[in-house]
Every structure is written in C-alpha cells, then in structure tokens.
C-alpha cells in the first residue's frame, strides 16, 4: 500500500496521461477529408504498377479516402492483390468492372497493400501518370510525389528531340506525361 502513494507511482501515471493527451492532440479527428488523403499520398514509393484484369468486390467502397469492404484485384492468372478494409487510397477510374478498364499502383509491405490508387489505362494498356520532376536512386519522382522504378533507357516521345533526359525535363517536364508499362512494372517512356 505504501507504493501506491509513492512519488514514483504518481510520476508514472502522470507520464502516461501526458502521452495519451499528446496522441489525442496530434492525431486529432479520425475522419479524413479527401485533401488529407491526397496529402498522405505524397511521397509514396510504389512497388506495384499493373493492369487490372478483373475486380471482385465484397461491399467495397471508398469513404473519406479509406476503403470499406474488400476488393480483390486480379492482375493475371497468378497474381491477385487484396485491399483490406481501412486501407488508404484513391479511385480515379470508374471502369473497374471492365477488362482493361483500369490499372493499379500500390505501396506494398510484403504482399499487404499499404496505400493504393486505381487509375485509368492509357493506350496499349499503359498507365499514364503525372510528369517526372527528377530521377533519384533508380526511381522516377513524379510531380505528385509518387516514386516508381524506371527503365535504364526512357523512350522520349516528342516531336522535338532532346540530347539528354535532363534537357527533356527542362524543356517539357511540367507538360509531359509519364508512361508506365505494367508488364515491366516501371516507367518506360515520357511523352510531350
């Protein structure tokens, strides 16, 4: 009983209360707006960029930037990505039920999806993403903060030729489109 009234006990209780208050103040409200989710999508190192062959939904929907229900994205005969309830992400493609209607980019931790974006497919079943702003350590950094691996040689699809990729970025960068080949799971080209 003497330890209950000791100063160490009360100091420990005070530390726990301060930590709990700090967590509540720093995390704030549980509901996230679309802007908050967009900001959280910044600086994402994406491990997966793929064509979606089919989608199986089990009460799947997006609410405040988080998934509700389950979504299985069938990428090919051997790979399926499962999006669990509560996974942050964005859905920018409304053709998910069509074969070849959408693609997916995702930040993975092993096989688990940490963050995802479902995007429309471009010509020849490619993903067309925002422009590249820089190349760093084997990753192309896009204007929205996404980072994807890139091919050793990037095809520059422009009417005007540039001597280097850095010249391409200076002249066409903000107006360009990044093209990802889902078969290679990396950036393979840029277009003006």
Image: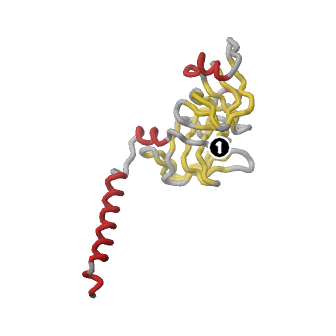
In the image, residue 124 lies at what x, y percent?
71, 28
Taking the image as shown, residue 170 lies to the left or right of residue 22, namely right
Q: Is residue 187 visible?
A: yes
Which residue lies at the image location 41% right of the left edge and 41% below the top edge? Answer: 36
Q: How is the image coloured?
A: secondary structure
Q: Position of residue 153 (x, y in %)?
A: 74, 28
Residue reaching furthest top?
160
Instruction: List x then y, in percent, for residue 3.
Output: 30, 84
Residue at the front extreme? 7
The residue sitting at 60% across, 16% down in the picture is: 171
In percent of width and height, residue 76 lies at: 72, 45
> How many numbered discs?
1
| Element type at mark 1 | strand
In the picture as drawn, the residue positioned furthest to the left comes out as: 5
**In which quarter of the view is residue 65 placed?**
top left
Q: Quadrant of the N terminus?
A: bottom left
Side (left or right) of 124 relative to 107? right
Q: Quadrant of the C terminus?
A: top right
Q: In front: 69, or 167?
A: 167
Is 77 on the left or on the right of 166, as rendered?
Answer: right
Q: Nearer the viewer, residue 137 or 150?
A: 137
Judging depth in this view, the residue of 67 and 43 nearest the camera is 43
Which of these two is toward me, 177 or 98? 177
Check disc 1 and report the residue beneath it.
Answer: 48
| Label 1 packing within 10 angstroms: few (<14), some (14-19), many (20+) | some
Residue 164 lies, with reference to residue 64, above or below; the image says: above
- In this orientation, does residue 98 appear? no
Q: Is residue 118 above or below residue 166?
A: below
Query: Going 64% across and 18% down the picture, which residue do you hit?
Result: 167
Q: Residue at (71%, 30%) from the top-left corner?
A: 188
């Amino acid at each position: 009983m003497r330890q209950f009234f000791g100063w160490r006990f009360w100091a420990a209780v005070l530390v726990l209360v301060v930590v709990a208050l700090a967590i509540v103040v720093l995390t704030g409200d549980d509901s996230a707006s679309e802007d908050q989710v967009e900001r959280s999508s910044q600086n994402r190192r994406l491990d997966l960029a793929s064509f979606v062959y089919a989608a199986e939904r089990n009460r799947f929907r997006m609410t405040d930037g988080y998934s509700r229900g389950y979504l299985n994205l069938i990428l090919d005969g051997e790979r399926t990505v499962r999006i669990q309830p509560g996974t942050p992400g964005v859905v920018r493609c409304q053709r998910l039920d069509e074969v070849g209607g959408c693609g997916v980019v995702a930040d993975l931790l092993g096989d688990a999806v940490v963050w995802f974006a479902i995007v429309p497919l471009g010509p020849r079943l490619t993903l067309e993403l925002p422009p590249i702003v820089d190349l760093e350590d084997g990753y192309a950094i896009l204007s929205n903060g996404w980072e994807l691996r890139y091919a050793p040689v990037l095809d520059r699809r422009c009417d005007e030729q540039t001597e280097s990729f850095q010249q391409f970025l200076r002249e066409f960068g903000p107006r360009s489109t990044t093209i990802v080949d889902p078969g290679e799971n990396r950036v393979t080209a840029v277009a003006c």
